[in-house]
Image: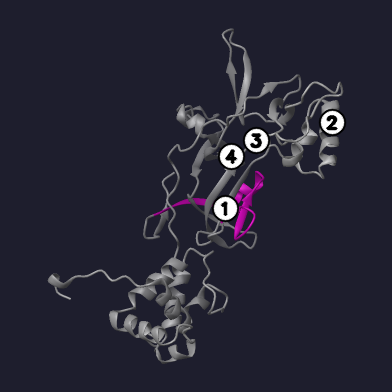
């Protein structure tokens, strides 16, 4: 087309679905199943892009005419549509095997810094207490066992038994009054124990400089992988959004025997060496810290959002950090290069 006749062509989803079927292209990402479009593999967008690129007006109109002839669109009528070229599926599979999906690293400080619940301290280290309304939708069954007052816990359990374990019905506003053993004093909220380890909460000081209430940190920004220059031992340091927002993270404060290898944010890419000694490319999905730590890595093409499913690697021990070969950076076109940190 010349410059005066440029146009944008929109291809209906139904048309691309029919072409994916007749060309057998779904099978590349769906273990041979030509019916099923694997939406859990991010590369399905690239498959659609290939189909759209090969659908000109004539082919689109041909599919539309066939569909208009028969509302159910018998797929046998599509058999006359030829493959785009000889060896088409092999060529597409080769491209899919080489393709690395690009995810933008999450470096901005987004989201809240602290969770909203205020905790009080107890005499035991790492043990805190907070108050929870029984009518709160976020009050769940596991919290019952964490109720501080044993007598109140027994009353709550007895109440639940009356309502077949249904929390919502047991403590609904229109339910019969829920009262203490005296039969008169209403129980509307309970005190609950919670364990929080160092580094997962922050204390708020009163006018005398004493910490009197505490808030759990809400979200981590990145993890710093450090290495001992003498023993080559590695360790992680989880850095919260709060710490980054206060600009408290200071690489210059590392102990003399430790050096920073690199920092990892969500969606950063790493090359790791597996148990089979093979190298693989993964992206960081999430990280958590506390008494232990966990860095969850996922294959770049894996579209699962559930951190319990899909092609995952979990780094949970200091020895597992040795599998990290290097940090990578990726551009919007999926080209990988070694990162500078």
Give the spatial CA distance, label 3 vs label 1: 18 Å
Please give the name of the residue rendered at 44% of the width and 80% of the height, measured from the top-left corner: 18
Dot 4: element: strand
The residue labelled by disc 4 is: 236
- For marks 3 and 4, the one nearer the N-term is 4
Residue drawn at x 40%, y 77% is 15
Is 297 magenta? The answer is: no
Q: Is 164 on the left-hand or right-hand side of 66?
A: right
Q: Do the residues labelled 4 and 2 touch (CB within 8 Å)?
A: no
Q: Which of 223 and 208 is in front in this view?
A: 208
Foreground disc of the pair 1, 2? 2
User: Which residue is disc 1 drawn over?
Assistant: 297
For mark 1, does the 10 Å Cα neighbourhood hold few (<14), some (14 to 19), or many (20 or more) residues? Answer: many
Residue at (62% x, 25% y) in the render: 118
User: CB of mark 3 within 8 Å of CB of mark 1?
Assistant: no
> Closer to the N terminus: mark 1 or mark 2?
2
> Relative to 165, is 47 above or below?
below
Q: Which mark is residue 290?
A: 3
Q: Does 313 appear in magenta? A: yes
Q: Position of residue 265 (x, y in %)?
A: 49, 44
Q: Mark 2 points at which residue?
A: 155
Residue range of the region highlighted in magenta in the rendering:
305-330
Where residue 163 appears, x then y in whole percent? 81, 42
Q: Is residue 312 above or below residue 66?
A: above
Counting residues from the start of the chain, the first of labels 3 and 1 encountered is 3
């Amino acid at each position: 087309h010349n410059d005066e006749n440029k146009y944008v062509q929109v291809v209906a989803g139904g048309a691309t679905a029919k072409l994916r079927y007749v060309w057998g292209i779904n099978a590349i990402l769906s273990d041979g199943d030509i019916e099923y479009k694997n939406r859990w593999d991010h590369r399905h967008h690239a498959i659609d892009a290939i189909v759209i690129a090969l659908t000109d007006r004539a082919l689109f109109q041909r599919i539309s005419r066939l569909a208009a002839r028969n509302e159910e669109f018998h797929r046998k009528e599509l058999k006359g549509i030829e493959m785009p070229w000889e060896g088409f599926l092999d060529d597409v599979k080769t491209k899919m095997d080489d393709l690395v999906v690009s995810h933008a690293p999450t470096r901005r400080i987004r989201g809240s810094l602290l969770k909203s619940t205020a905790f009080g301290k107890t005499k035991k280290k790492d043990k805190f207490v907070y108050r929870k309304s029984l009518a709160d939708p976020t009050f769940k069954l596991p919290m019952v066992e964490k109720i501080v007052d044993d007598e109140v816990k027994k009353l709550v359990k007895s109440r639940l038994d009356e309502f077949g374990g249904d929390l919502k019905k047991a403590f609904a506003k229109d339910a019969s009054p829920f009262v203490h053993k005296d039969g008169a004093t209403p129980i509307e909220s309970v005190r609950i124990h919670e364990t929080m380890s160092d580094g997962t909460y922050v204390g708020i000081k009163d006018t005398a400089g004493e910490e009197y209430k505490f808030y759990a940190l809400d979200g981590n920004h990145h993890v710093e992988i450090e290495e001992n220059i003498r023993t080559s031992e590695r360790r992680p340091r989880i850095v919260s959004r709060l710490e980054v927002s206060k600009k408290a993270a200071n690489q210059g404060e590392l102990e003399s025997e430790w050096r920073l290898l690199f920092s990892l944010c969500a969606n950063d890419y790493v090359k790791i060496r597996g148990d089979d000694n093979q190298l693989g490319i993964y992206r960081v999905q999430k990280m958590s810290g506390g008494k232990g730590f966990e860095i969850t890595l996922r294959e770049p093409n894996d579209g699962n959002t559930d951190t319990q499913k899909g092609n995952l690697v979990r780094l949970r021990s200091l020895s597992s950090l040795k599998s990290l070969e290097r940090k990578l950076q990726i551009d919007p076109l999926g080209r990988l290069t070694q990162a500078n940190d």
